[in-house]
Amino acid sequence: MVASLMGCSMGHRDPVEVKQALNESINEANSRALEE
């Protein structure tokens, strides 16, 4: 999921937006893992 997001975003967004999107994805994944 994160890898595909990174691949799609790299050409179209600036690096800061890519980092923010990746951080959001990671935070969501961590939250789900903690809930379970």
Image: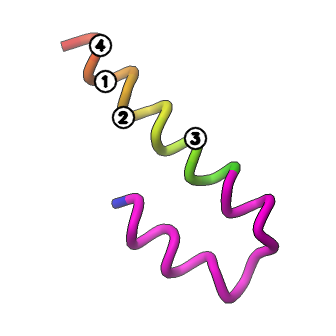
**Which residues fall within the magenta stretch?**
2-19
3 up-or-down from 20: above or below: below
In the image: residue 34, left or right of residue 10: left
Circle on res. 15: none
Looking at marks 2 and 3 on the same chain, the residue that comes earlier in the sequence is marked by 3
Residue marked by disc 1: 32
- Classed neighbour count for the residue bearing mark 2: other residues with Cα under 10 Å, few (<14), some (14–19), many (≥20): few
Alpha-carbon span between mark 4 and mark 3? 15 Å
- What kind of residue is marked 2? Ala
**Figure quadrant of residue 13:** bottom right
| Residue displayed at 49% across by 31% down | 27
Q: Was residue 30 drawn as part of the magenta stretch in this picture?
A: no
- What kind of residue is marked 3? Glu
Where residue 20 sits in the image (x, y, percent)?
69, 49
Where residue 1 sits in the image (x, y, percent)?
34, 60
Residue marked by disc 4: 34
Q: Are marks 1 and 2 in contact (CB under 8 Å)?
A: yes
